[in-house]
Amino acid sequence: MKKTKFTENQIVKILKENQLVRSVLELARELGVNKSSIYYWRKIDLHQKR
């Protein structure tokens, strides 16, 4: 499996930022990731909370 450059804690922080104030596109540009990565992380996070 491909190793990510973000830790699980960093991803959680990114998702919280997205929920509170920042858009996916803005975060993706700042972090240098594809916006689909953020949507994927959000999807995985929702499945883990169930």
Image (spheres, helix red, strand yellow):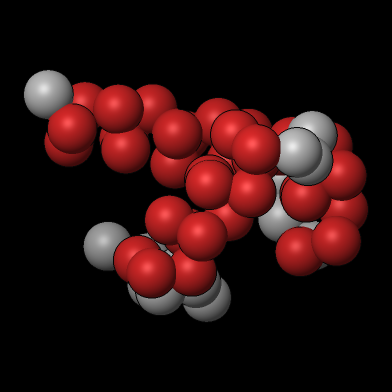
The spot of residue 9 in percent (x, y) is: 38, 69
Tell whether 20 sits left or right of 42. right
Tell whether 30 sits left or right of 43. right
In the rendered image, the quadrant that contains the C terminus is top left
The spot of residue 27 in percent (x, y) is: 78, 50
Give the residue furthest to the front. 20
Tell whether 40 sits left or right of 1. right
For the point 64% across and 49% down, the residue is 17
For the point 85% across and 61% down, the residue is 30
Q: Is 10 drawn above or below residue 21 in the view shown?
A: below
The spot of residue 8 in percent (x, y) is: 35, 66
Camera-side residue of 2 and 28:
28
For the point 78% across and 40% down, the residue is 22
For the point 17% across and 36% down, the residue is 48
- Quarter of the image for residue 21 reads top right
- Quarter of the image for residue 12 reads bottom left
The spot of residue 35 in percent (x, y) is: 71, 38
- Quarter of the image for residue 32 reads bottom right
Camera-side residue of 3 and 27:
27
Give the residue furthest to the left. 50
